[in-house]
Amino acid sequence: MITHTPEVLDFSSMEKNTVQYETIRGHYLFSGLDEDVFEAIAADFATESFEKGEILFHRGDVADDFYFIESGQIELSLISPDGQKKVVEVIANGRTFAEAIVFMREAKFPVTAEALSNSVVYRIPNNTYRTMLRSNPDACMRLLSDVCRHLHQRVQEIERLTIQNARSRLASYLIDHVVETNDDEATVRLDLPKHIIASRLSITPETLSRLLRAMADDGILTVDDRLIFVHSLARLRPYD
């Protein structure tokens, strides 16, 4: 893991009518804001670049900002009492992370964030966002509605992870990552290393390998590195 000062990009990517502007504007933390309010806080956004393996912050660091990912993947992790790293989540482009700290009294990061690939992020000052909410009750109510909707989606994801068995969780993951279909067949692309996928599914890498081998032996799929060819979605879906 590498830790050093990130590169601050010397360009403005938050100009109106750009793809970047519309993408972050549509995020649930900003979609309920009036245009002038969003433009005012967007002026404080900083665009930063991180290379693969760089650390954005460590658990326990003071949290003055939260982040929106323009491109790349960021891994959030914890170190367990026995010294093992537990991947809490992998965040990809178009999503935010560490935003909950805006509403917390103790402004410290609860996890470590590492770039899994070369990444570009927006750093958004907590004070700027918090000040905007304090002066805009309507924005607070719209944000509360959007956050509740987002929370409901996450609860459903947690239920799927805790209630379904390992094979069902893997089948659900594969179906979520289908990139091409042809009648009952499909192609799945694994964008993350298998040990990270295993951690996300709350299983060991060995269990993931056994499950994939079992599905291959059953004629459901064929594994070719990070591409998985599903021969029968109908046979895969009963485990979903």
Image: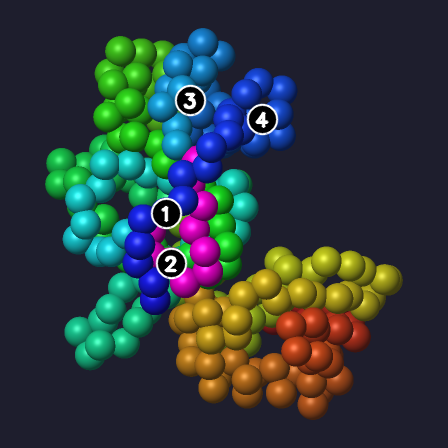
Which residue is at a point 80% across and 60% down the rendered structure image?
181
**Quick one: SS at disc 2?**
loop
Neighbour class for label 4 at 10 Å: few (<14), some, many (≥20)? some
Of labels 2 and 1, earlier in sequence is 1
Q: Quadrant of the N terminus?
A: bottom left
- The residue to which callout 4 is attached is 22
Main secondary structure of the magenta stretch: strand
Choose mark 2 or mark 4, whichever is in front.
2
**Do labels 3 and 1 touch, CB within 8 Å?**
no
Give the extent of the magenta segment.
47-56
- Identity of the residue furthest to the bottom in this view: 217
Q: Position of residue 216 (x, y in %)?
A: 69, 85
Of labels 2 and 4, earlier in sequence is 4
- In front of the other: 117 or 162: 117
| In the rendered image, the vertical position of residue 96 relative to residue 124, given as above or below | below
Q: Position of residue 164 (x, y in %)?
A: 48, 68
* Disc 3/disc 1 C-alpha distance (Å): 20 Å
Choose mark 3 or mark 1, whichever is in front.
1
- Identity of the residue furthest to the left in this view: 106
Q: Position of residue 84 (x, y in %)?
A: 27, 76
Of labels 4 and 1, earlier in sequence is 1
Neighbour class for label 3 at 10 Å: few (<14), some, many (≥20)? many
**Do labels 2 and 1 touch, CB within 8 Å?**
yes
- The residue to which callout 3 is attached is 42
